[in-house]
Image: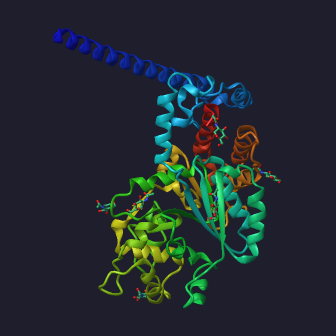
Amino acid sequence: MRRVVRMALLCLGCGLCSLLYAFSQLALSLEQEAARWQEDAAFPVRRQLSGGGGGWKAVAGSAAGRREQAVVPPERCENVSISYWNSYWMLPSDVCGMNCFWEAARRYTSQKKRPAEKMHLAVVACGERLEETITMLQSAIIFSIKRLQFHIFAEDQLHSDFQRILDGLAYQEKFNYTLYPITFPTENAAEWKKLFKPCASQRLFLPMILKEVDSLLYVDTDILFLRPVDDIWSFLKKFNTTQIAAMAPEHEEPRIGWYNRFARHPYYGKTGINSGVMLMNMTRIRRKYFKNDMTTARLRWEEILMPLLKKYKLNITWGDQDLLNIMFFHNPESLFIFPCQWNYRPDHCIYGSNCQQAEKEGIFILHGNRGVYHDDKQPTFRAVYDAIRNYSFGDDLIHAFLLPLELELQKTQHTYCGRIYKVFIKQLTKSIRGIYDRTAKGS
Ligand SMILES: *[C@@H]1O[C@H](CO)[C@@H](O)[C@H](O)[C@H]1NC(C)=O
Ligand SMILES: *[C@@H]1O[C@H](CO)[C@@H](O)[C@H](O)[C@H]1NC(C)=O
Ligand SMILES: *[C@@H]1O[C@H](CO)[C@@H](O)[C@H](O)[C@H]1NC(C)=O
Ligand SMILES: *[C@@H]1O[C@H](CO)[C@@H](O)[C@H](O)[C@H]1NC(C)=O
Ligand SMILES: *[C@@H]1O[C@H](CO)[C@@H](O)[C@H](O)[C@H]1NC(C)=O
Ligand SMILES: *[C@@H]1O[C@H](CO)[C@@H](O)[C@H](O)[C@H]1NC(C)=O
């Protein structure tokens, strides 16, 4: 008799197990189907976009239309977390499918894991740099994916203009900003202000001013992003344990390099580094003790700046960038070098093209130093600047931006930089394609 009972219990157990297995399989297949559905919805647009370079025009017109008909992607459960007071069988049937229980549970944990990481971007704007800075910020907003937090250091008289323009921009959900006055350590404030251009040395103090910020991308005002900020931001994760900052070389070609021919102070590597685009893990900068040529003791970032300025004051030409070169000369293991296409300057093309990576993959970040956005010496650089400045959010990126820009660039082919004008729109074209892809996916 006991044996029969035991057998019956065993059978019941097995039955229950297989029932559970069947349910989980069903849930899995529904999930996969949902994923496939999402891909299909995005597919038509993507296929058109990849249909050869000539297909741009056709695509532009249809992309907007597609967006309207795009089926609601199966993200019904995104906002629904299952708990005891709204268990899944009590939810309306159009909110959740069979797999909602699993889906919602998974989404809930993944949401909890990442509290929407923001990318921090800092810029220092003085004098006549308002329009240029706004154009730079605009390029960051157009192409970026994750949310941006701008830290804008500006002279007091510029604050109200910044506020008015930034509050009037579209896409408020993509960025947030804070305005700061220009500040220097009280001792020697005058000396710091004089260095190089007014306010340029402000950025050396960012690790101490923005104490709460872990990582930061600092850019000059004359920078234009031609691809999402997300992509340069992702270098932070590639730092090895000793690296604290990332920059591009000052020159690719030593024969026209400045530091190796003229500098009267130490500098990083063969040709020095350019500080116009500087990615920093400021947590690490604040923690590090730096080797130096002033004392045998290692010094912290905030301790090293003043002695460095005092020692090299008479020998430096490019201000804060020279000081950074001296620092990383003594601490080369702390620097991550990214290729020239992340900081592409007139030097890379005015004497002939010498940034090979850009020729292959296009320019990622354009740096119009020497004022080339505002005079007629390098019309290729100026055309890109004008196009981004002229662009209003919401306009069709292909018809109202890319195609007119290409026409302008073609007119510059009499210059060295204009000869390789395709390099200026190669990545831009890909970035715009990425935007259309993301819109089609409904994210
Ligand atoms: C989720 O909630 C947000 C606001 O909290 C809302 O804008 C969005 O439409 C909701 N998404 C879905 C799929 O219901
Ligand atoms: C925007 O920035 C301000 C100042 O840094 C901060 O107080 C505020 O919480 C931020 N807003 C959002 C939505 O992140
Ligand atoms: C910066 O460095 C700190 C300390 O090593 C690390 O905890 C943090 O995750 C780094 N930040 C990023 C964005 O990688
Ligand atoms: C500054 O430059 C002069 C002339 O080249 C040189 O003799 C001197 O050692 C330099 N000073 C420092 C601190 O390197
Ligand atoms: C990190 O990379 C730098 C530059 O390539 C190198 O000099 C340094 O030794 C590396 N650090 C470690 C711990 O591998
Ligand atoms: C930008 O707009 C100005 C007039 O506001 C126009 O003259 C110029 O051609 C435009 N540039 C581009 C590249 O669209």
Task: Kindly identify the residue that appears in the image at 44 percent across and 54 percent down.
Answer: 235
Q: Nearer the viewer, residue 271 or 310?
A: 310
Q: Is residue 201 visible?
A: yes
Q: Is residue 28 above or below residue 75?
A: above
Describe residue 71's horizontal placement relative to residue 240 as left or right: right
Q: Is residue 333 above or below residue 357?
A: below
Residue 178 placement (x, y as % from top left): 65, 66
Q: Quadrant of the N terminus?
A: top left
**Figure quadrant of residue 293:** bottom left
Q: Quadrant of the C terminus?
A: top right
Please count the marks in the image.
0
**Figure quadrant of residue 254:** bottom left
Describe residue 413's horizontal placement relative to residue 84 as left or right: right
Q: Nearer the viewer, residue 149 or 115?
A: 115
Task: Kindly identify the residue that appears in the image at 46 percent across and 47 percent down.
Answer: 113
Residue 167 placement (x, y as % from top left): 75, 59
Q: Nearer the viewer, residue 286 or 2?
A: 2
Residue 168 placement (x, y as % from top left): 78, 56
Task: Kindly identify the residue that appears in the image at 75 percent across and 49 percent down.
Answer: 391
The quadrant where ligand 3 appears is bottom left
Q: Is residue 271 visible?
A: no
**Figure quadrant of residue 268:** bottom left
Residue 347 placement (x, y as % from top left): 55, 61
Task: Kindly identify the residue that appears in the image at 47 percent across and 42 percent down.
Answer: 110
